[in-house]
Amino acid sequence: MRRSIRFAAAGTTAAVGLSLLALAAPAQAERTERASDRANPLGLRSDFDPNAFDAQGAERARSWASVQAGMDEMIDDGAVGAVARIDTPKGAREWSAGDRRMWSSLPANPEGAFRVASNTKMMVATLVMQQVDKGTWSLDTTVEEIAPGLLPGHGEVTLEQLLSHTSGMPEGVLHLLYTKMADPNSFPDFIEVLGESYEPEQVIAAALQEEWQFEPGTGFFYSNAGYVVLGTLLERATGQPLAVQLRRNIFAPAGMTRSAFPSEPGLRLGSNFEAAKTPVPNRWWGLPDWDPDLFWAAGATVSTTRDLARFTKSLLSGKLTSRASLAQMLTPRSDAGYGLGVFAIPDPCTPAGAPQQYLVGHNGASFGTFSFAMSSTDGTRQFSMGITGRHFKSLEQPYDMYGLVARIAAETCT
């Protein structure tokens, strides 16, 4: 379902991140909750929260005297480390708080790299739209036309539906992990299987073992497997590894000199954070061994706040796609407010009395890190941030992540 407006209203804006099991659009919420209760014994949840940027969150953000005060408070409340950056016509500013990693006193570095998780989806969506610009594909091109047999029984799914999470394809990653666990109720078993090696084909196969969420084009369900399919299609169509396509067609033209798409465990690039720290009752877990190919095209990118800002600026300035393709990306396809690899949040810099403006981009939630990368629609203002120290077993974090997002976004107005 394509909506006629460019962005979602503030009350329905979705803060969609890289999920273990994403929540569906309102029409599917009850059905999805029942299914997730059966298939998700550990109760792991995504950070999908349509009310994350409500007026209350903005009020919390205004209560902090500065971005630094908000970041320091977040560390006091349970995060490990945080870095943030804004870019405006007046220049760039950076902040940091906490430690680079758990069990260390090295301070977080604003220029350090971290896992940006589902911000990868913006980049993969851009690669797809570049193929549309070349005339190789259209948004109506089906999976079966590009890769016959890749999605048996569901080959009619289109690129547009995969890009917008309206295909109905299951999430895939969590199901794959649970099938490998000796005890699906055991968090130590969960940590252990993260250390195994994975291939994108396994994620797709796992998703195909699950019940399809709905008929393509009739709802919204955030699917990591859907973006793994897109990465597979890009490789088959171009004959180039996805890492090469990202390096040549995204990182290089955007000036992202400290970004990578790793296929092996561990962070490089003078990393700011270790893989992730996952607290469960009475314990933190280090995750240096999990294979980024588990999420691959849905979330394997490692980057920095500066490089994320460079990407969103390049995208919204029309440097990476045609203006027509950019307009397609910014058009929501469902009531969740999600376009093609991007979503919008209210722009706090909207002048009083003027129509609401929006910041556009994505966020990401890996097994222990969060990230955000947003830009004004004219490409003149950006903010980006990374946080390590995600607490599982709850949608709520002990620290006010969304309040900090709102406070940093407001800083771009000055």
Image: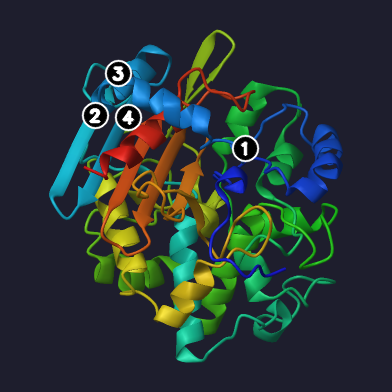
The residue that appears at 62% across and 70% down in the rendered structure is: 4
Residues packed near mark 4 inside 10 Å, few (<14), some (14 to 19) or many (20 plus): many
| Secondary structure state at the residue bearing disc 1 | loop
The residue that appears at 36% across and 12% down in the rendered structure is: 76
Residue topped by disc 1: 46
Residues packed near mark 2 inside 10 Å, few (<14), some (14 to 19) or many (20 plus): many
Residue topped by disc 2: 96
| Secondary structure state at the residue bearing disc 4 | strand
Q: Earlier in the sequence, mark 1 or mark 3?
A: 1
Residue topped by disc 3: 72
Mark-to-mark CA distance, 4 and 3: 9 Å
Q: Earlier in the sequence, mark 2 or mark 4?
A: 4
| Secondary structure state at the residue bearing disc 3 | helix
Residue 381 as seen in the image, left or right of residue 134: left
Label pair 1/4, CB-CB below 8 angstroms: no
Residue 55, image x, y percentages = 51, 32
Residue 206's tag is none
Mark-to-mark CA distance, 2 and 4: 6 Å
| Secondary structure state at the residue bearing disc 2 | strand
Q: Earlier in the sequence, mark 1 or mark 4?
A: 1
Residue 307 visible (yes or no)? yes
Residue 82's tag is 4
Q: Nearer the viewer, residue 386 or 94?
A: 94
